[in-house]
Amino acid sequence: MFMTLVFALLERRFSIILLPFIFVCQLNVYCQTDDKITTFKHSEFSFQYPAAWRVDTSHLMGTTVVALSPLSNSDDKFHENFNVLIQDAKPCNNDLENYGKISEKQILKLMNNATIYSSSIVKENNKVFYKLEYAAQQGMFNLRFVSYCFMKSDKAYLLTFTSEQGTFSSFKEIGEQILNSFTLFSK
């Protein structure tokens, strides 16, 4: 009964995060890219991203930060992006496995044509996190997502890299570099 209540509360609490906050689109804007890397620093974390990407800290759709790629040409309508969302982890007892199960359930329930490719708890480079790879349709876009979730001090740090499904292989490496550069600061 208790777990049913927890899952019910989490479904309501987390349903907003899996909606189109990950989806960021602008029309008729493009710029060139370069290979320079820069670092974004927040009071609780940092990550590295391409210097040509634009950073938005306006808390767009509840995110703490969003880094947006430039459009590749005048026909490109989607900004590949990376975002960080900080949530209260107490409702899932600071448990990555619970968080993962809830996330999978919500993705399949709330997103159009969702497919989960992989879901696991990863331990590498002195980091432990939940990793989820999936695809879904949002509006006119078929998207591919790679999410990592870290938990620390009753907080869940949800990182998501989003790309169009058709260009995912071109952006996969930079997406992984951004995700893997994420560092939580000690307090």
Image (tube, rainbow, N blue to C red):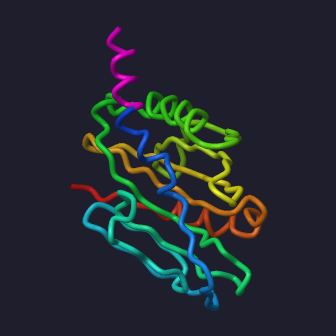
Residue drawn where x is 61% and y is 37% of the image: 119
State whether residue 92 is above or below residue 186.
Answer: above
State whether residue 108 is above or below residue 112.
Answer: above
Give the percent coordinates (x, y) of residue 83: 46, 62
**The N terminus lies in quadrant:** top left
**The C terminus lies in quadrant:** bottom left
Spot the residue most to the left.
Answer: 187
- Magenta-colored segment: predominant secondary structure: helix
Residue drawn where x is 60% and y is 79% of the image: 27
* Residue 151 among magenta residues: no
Give the percent coordinates (x, y) of residue 88: 29, 42
Q: Is residue 5 left or right of residue 180?
A: left
Determine which quarter of the picture holds residue 105.
top right
Give the percent coordinates (x, y) of residue 2: 32, 12
Give the percent coordinates (x, y) of residue 72: 69, 83
* Residue 2 among magenta residues: yes
Q: Is residue 139 left or right of residue 103?
A: right
Determine which quarter of the picture holds residue 184.
bottom left
* Residue segment shown in magenta: 1-11
Q: Is residue 129 left or right of residue 185?
A: right
Q: Is residue 159 left or right of residue 8?
A: right
State whether residue 88 is above or below residue 139.
Answer: above
State whether residue 94 is above or below residue 140.
Answer: above
